[in-house]
Image (tube, helix red, strand yellow):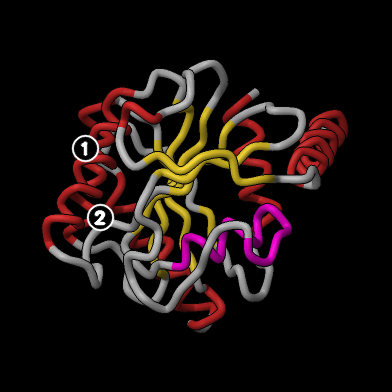
Amino acid sequence: MPGSDNQDDDRRRAADKLFAQNWQFFRGVPSLEFLPPADRPEIAFAGRSNVGKSSLINALLNRKSLARTSNTPGRTQELNFFLTETADFYLVDMPGYGFAKAPKTKVDAWTDLIKDYLRGRPTLRRVYVLIDARHGIKPVDETIFALLDEAAAIYQIVLTKIDKIKPPAVAHVIAQTEAALKPHAAAFPEIIATSSEKNLGLDDLRLSVFEAIV
């Protein structure tokens, strides 16, 4: 239907406009008592350490170094909140889970922070769980899926680094991921395949975020 195409174009333009704003770092949250008031929608990004989360957030927001990137797993150690001048919603960069080059006590603290935030944040509209397309879903990802299911927090899988594998392999990992998500009640069915380096899939991700908050 022509109207449907026009509506899709309108939504994409609105999403592009939202992400073209001047995004700024708002607050780092090392523990729950430092959370900002739950007064607007929140979109969170989660993923294993070194999955390319900060790089994807920078590409999504059209910024080079707003979210700190590093080759060292575990660089993000807090819940980092980002906001625009219109303050429509918070975008939250979560600490990477799984392997990190840090003392076990610190990694455990990050893990507890992630779990407590996911369980108890009423304004959390969607969690984007990033999966490295080269490696697929790992047991530690399944642990996060189970936690999100338990919390009834809607989440969507974003494949990262698809430029590092050949197109047939991308289609294969998408199919594998879709099959793995079928038992998970809170999982959004659509998989978004991205590359922050090649700017692939970013428009689809922006549109998904926009639709999650409106």
Q: Residue at x 38, y 30 (%)?
A: 34
Answer whether labels 1 and 2 touch (C-beta < 8 Å): no
Mark 2 — residue? 141
> Quick one: label 2, few (<14), some, or many (20+) residues within 10 Å?
some
Q: Is residue 162 left or right of residue 96?
A: right
x then y, percent, for residue 202: 66, 57
Mark 1 secondary-structure assignment: helix
Q: Residue at x 52, y 73 (%)?
A: 162
x then y, percent, for residue 94: 40, 48
Residue 184, by quadrant, is top left
State which quarter of the image contains the C terminus.
top right
- Give 48 or 63, whichever is nearer the viewer: 63
Extent of the magenta region: 52-65
Q: Residue at x 21, y 37 (%)?
A: 147
Q: Residue at x 55, y 24 (%)?
A: 41
The image shows residue 185, relative to residue 178, as above or below, that is above
Amino acid type, callout 1 = Leu
Mark 1 — residue? 147
Residue 131, by quadrant, is bottom left
Separation of marks 1 and 2 at Cα, in angstroms: 10 Å
- Give 96 or 169, whichever is nearer the viewer: 96
The image shows residue 140, relative to residue 52, as above or below, that is above
Mark 2 secondary-structure assignment: helix
**Extreme left residue here?**
104
Amino acid type, callout 2 = Asp
Q: Is residue 86 left or right of residue 38?
A: right
- Residue 9 is a magenta residue: no
**Of label 1 and label 2, which has the lower sequence position?**
2
x then y, percent, for residue 78: 37, 48
- Give 29 or 173, whichever is nearer the viewer: 29
